[in-house]
Image (cartoon, rainbow, N blue to C red):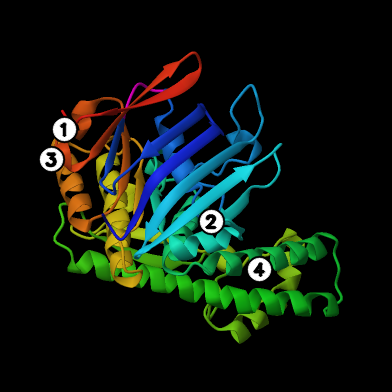
Amino acid sequence: MSGLAITTLGLSHFRSHKRARLELNGRPVAIHGPNGAGKTNILEAVSMLSPGRGMRRASAEDLARRPESLGWKITASLTSLGRNHEIETLSENAAPRQVRIDGKAAPQTALGRIARILWLIPSMDRLWIEGAEGRRRFLDRATLSFEPAHAEVVLTYEKAMRERNRLLKDQVADAHWYRALESQMAEAGAVIHRNRAHAISRLSEAQARAETAFPTAVLTLTHPDPAPEAPDDPDALQAGFAAGRSRDMAAGRTLAGPHRADLDALFAAKGVAARDCSTGEQKALLVSLILANGRALAEDFGAPPILLLDEVAAHLDAGRRAALYDEICALGAQAFLTGTGPELFADLGARAQWLAVQEEHQTSRIEPEEAP
């Protein structure tokens, strides 16, 4: 079994699953079934074993099975670096979700210290051609995988920025009200930038050292005008926030800082920006980055992450699908993969566990299968 793996997964009143229990052994998991059967919901449940709102960023209320809306619960047995953990995460009556690790209440951030979970979902296929927010989120998920405390730093920055924006909208001119908030933003903002830069460096190193069928992406962290002069220097950031107050007051919001950073990617072999690549090339670049993240984490964390690859075969030809499966198995990662038909996973064969998902009476049913 890999150094990081889910060995049992239980779902109760989660999305389309009324009750389900999976016994897993650390191998990749090939999940197939028709659209709407509940395959992605299994991956989403696994994503809730990490900090945050999961791979679809849904509210706790939206995760509850309809029409009962009784709340939901996910349980998992996790093997991580030679230790076994029992995890529960749940929500009752649309309340914020709770986390328990080994029977004790824990903050969500504690999940990031015992597990690393990465995902690639269809909504990310347009990552390179849509707004910067999605690319920041993608980068921050990668950054969080290397530095679990990154989430807390981002929350600190965003909380202080919301307070500052409130002052700006209210046209408060007294500098006294801004200094403490801008100091918090500057300290947190510098850490955010350094964490992101480290993540980009690790991804780049992992790509450069790998023999892979997927293209290398040259990554750059950019800022739109007005850009911070020294985004990793808290003193310079604080001075920039102070100097920009009149401009920000006119806009009613903070116009410069890590919350406006963007991630640029270049298809290295062609020298073409990712946004100008074909749909297939853009997908291949995303797969390349997820695999690079996995390789880097295998070194830094001590085990490859759990991978959630929803409809991963889309926009990948048969050759690249086979190459992806080979790289996942070589990495030793427990990957959950979904697709509409078993033929999409034929190259995995007995290297994977197989699950068929069907919908019966508005309830998802999961059946283990032998490898074809």
Looking at the rendered structure, the kind of residue marked 2 is Pro
Closest to the camera, between mark 4 and mark 2, is 2
Return the residue at label 4: 156
The answer to whether residue 108 is above or below residue 30 is below
- Mark 4 neighbour density, 10 Å: few (under 14) some (14–19) many (20 or more): some
Tell me which amino acid carries mark 3: Gly
Magenta stretch prevailing secondary structure: loop
Magenta span includes 35: yes
**Residues drawn in magenta:** 32-36
Question: Is 23 located above or below residue 258 in the figure?
Answer: above
Task: Of the two numbered discs 2 and 3 on the same chain, state the one appearing first in sequence.
Answer: 2
Tell me which numbered mark, 4 or 3, is placed earlier along the sequence: 4
Marks 4,3: beta carbons within 8 A: no
Taking the image as shown, residue 175 lies to the left or right of residue 152, namely right
Give the number of the mark in front: 1 or 3.
1
What's the CA distance linking mark 4 and mark 2?
15 Å
For the residue marked with disc 1, what is the amino acid?
Ala
Label annotation for residue 346: 1
Task: Label 2, secondary structure: give it.
Answer: loop
Q: Which mark is residue 319?
A: 3
Please report the residue visible at 64 percent of the width from the left and 35 percent of the height from the top. Answer: 71
